[in-house]
Image (spheres, rainbow, N blue to C red):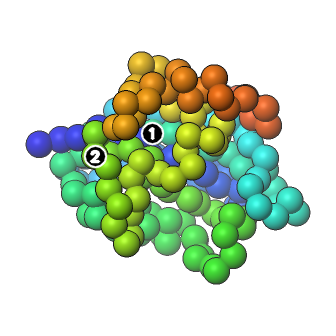
Amino acid sequence: MSERVYIGLGSNLAQPLRQLRTALDSLAALPRSQLARVSSFYASDPLGPADQPRYVNAVAALDTGLSPLELLDALQAIELDQGRVRKDERWGPRTLDLDILLFGDRQLDEPRLVVPHYHMHARAFVLYPLAEIAPDLVLPDGRALTLLLQACPFSGLERLAQASQVTP
């Protein structure tokens, strides 16, 4: 059985547009999974230290038969393959960040994975790309995405291009 999963993608090092395109190719190649939709790419101001480049972000919809932890392991392997180095510093620069935002209607609170992703409700670089590919989405707790957007201004975001228009 397949579930719709939404994955946030972000990069601000080593050619971020290329990093996201490569990650999307890797997502499309995951076993028992099919890449369903991809938002436009957006430039966003970094969270945390201000002395880092702007991020490029997107959201992908993936239909998968993988379990949540199998998918998490696969996403972390993709990050490592693309040069991700995990540091103690939170919100620092990175080649690639892949986050499970939503996993079907599940609400998970496990040591390695919390879904829905914490703070996604307050992050424009997540909500606006997500709304682009799933405008009628309702979160597992019953909140409509449209209401979250009303409370989260578009400021700090710049729509760059549709994913299909970005060459690797």
59 in relation to 31, above or below? above
- The residue under label 1 is 60
Q: In the rendered image of this protein, does residue 18 appear above or below residue 127?
A: below
**Most foreground residue, 18 or 143:** 143
User: On the rendered structure, is 118 left or right of 88?
Assistant: left
- Circle 2 crowding by C-alpha within 10 Å: few under 14, some 14–19, many from 20: some
Considering the numbered disc 2 on the image, is that residue within a helix, a strand or a loop? loop
129 shown above or below 85: above
Q: Residue sitting at 61 percent across and 51 percent down?
A: 10
- Dot 1 falls on a residue whose secondary structure is strand
Neighbor class of circle 1 (other Cα within 10 Å; few <14, some 14-19, many 20+) is many
Q: Which quadrant would residue 44 be assigned to in this image? A: top right
User: Who's the residue at 66% across and 70% down the image?
Assistant: 90
Q: Position of residue 166 (x, y in %)?
A: 61, 35
Residue furthest to the bottom: 88
Q: Position of residue 94 (x, y in %)?
A: 66, 65
List x then y, in percent, for residue 98.
Answer: 50, 56
Which residue corresponds to the image point at 51% horizontal and 32% vertical from the top-left? 130
Could you tell me which quadrant the N terminus lies in?
top left
Name the amino acid type tagged 1: Ala
Q: Residue under circle 2?
A: 106
Q: Is residue 74 visible?
A: no
Residue 144, percent from left and from top:
45, 25
From the image, which quarter does the C terminus lie in? top right
At a point 43% along the width and 67% down the height, the residue shown is 76
Q: Amino acid at mark 2?
A: Arg
Front-lying residue, 141 or 23:
141
Query: Along the polypeptide, which appears first: circle 2 or circle 1?
Result: 1
Distance between the alpha carbons at the discs numbered 2 and 1: 17 Å
